[in-house]
Image: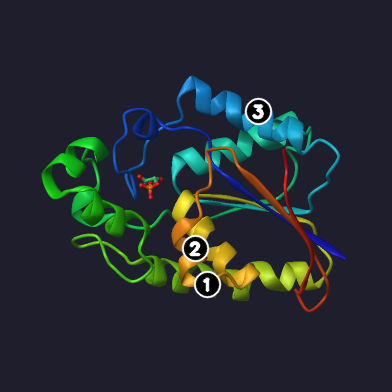
Amino acid sequence: MALLVLVRHGQSVANLANVFTGWLDVALTPQGEAEARQAGQRLHALHFDLAYCSTLIRSRRTLELILAQLHQDSVPVVAADALRERMYGALQGLNKAETIRKYGEDQVNRWRRSYEDAPPEGETLHHTQQRVFAYFETEIGPQLRRGKNVLVVSHGNTLRALRMQLEGLSVAQVEALEIPTGGIRAYDLDPDLRIRRAWDLP
Ligand SMILES: O=C(O)[C@H](O)COP(=O)(O)O
């Protein structure tokens, strides 16, 4: 039996300012740091063998705070470019509310949530999914098959894409899926990586 836990990073300064972030490398806010520590408290009964984060500081810092809270600072950590947020292209750095005023809610909603529509010069969720899942299959999956407990701290859209693949969600389901900052999803997996149980940690 292996445990896989997916956590979205805590609130960043760009989340607070309601700015499209993508690959911008922004820090956590004090609230985001608190959300990371709380995530550690919510995970208190669990022991991890290995942890992954993206190479963006909001993900790395969230993982660091979780492991410190768990007194599991010696867990090996791998930071991977493949786990970075969806690249938001020309939208990166723009305020979301102003972008809605300029282009309309329907267009902005398609850019944010559609599976196949790319933001200008950015990645579709489908492309994000291909790079995230390729990494999952080659790097994370083999650890889970060996029965390791794995913690992954990543981003809103990478986790939506990964959850779609793992849970077999439809396009309509992934387009409606919202993951809050600090949100935690856990899976109990069999050796073939089939889900025996999936749950959100309160
Ligand atoms: O990159 C961002 O702006 C956020 O991490 C996710 O934003 P979204 O909810 O607009 O996709």
Look at the image and tell me in which quarter the N terminus lies: bottom right
Look at the image and tell me in which quarter the C terminus lies: top right
Q: Position of residue 55 (x, y in %)?
A: 47, 50
Q: Amino acid at mark 3?
A: Arg
Q: Is residue 131 above or below residue 122?
A: below
Say which of 178 and 31 sits in front: 178
Q: 103 left or right of 159?
A: left
Q: Is residue 64 above or below residue 141?
A: above
Q: Residue at x 24, y 54 (%)?
A: 106
Q: Is residue 202 above or below residue 2?
A: above
**Element type at mark 2:** helix
Q: Amino acid at mark 2?
A: Val
Mark 1: C-beta under 8 Å from nearest atom of ligand 1: no
Q: Residue at x 71, y 31 (%)?
A: 68
Q: Position of residue 38 (x, y in %)?
A: 67, 28
In the drawing, what numbered circle is on residue 174? Answer: 2
In the drawing, what numbered circle is on residue 170? Answer: 1
Marks 2/3 in contact by CB < 8 Å: the verdict is: no
Say which of 170 and 192 sits in front: 170
Among the 4 quarters of the image, the one containing residue 123: bottom left
Residue ID for mark 3: 37
Marks 1/2 in contact by CB < 8 Å: the verdict is: yes
**Element type at mark 3:** helix
Q: Residue at x 44, y 61 (%)?
A: 175
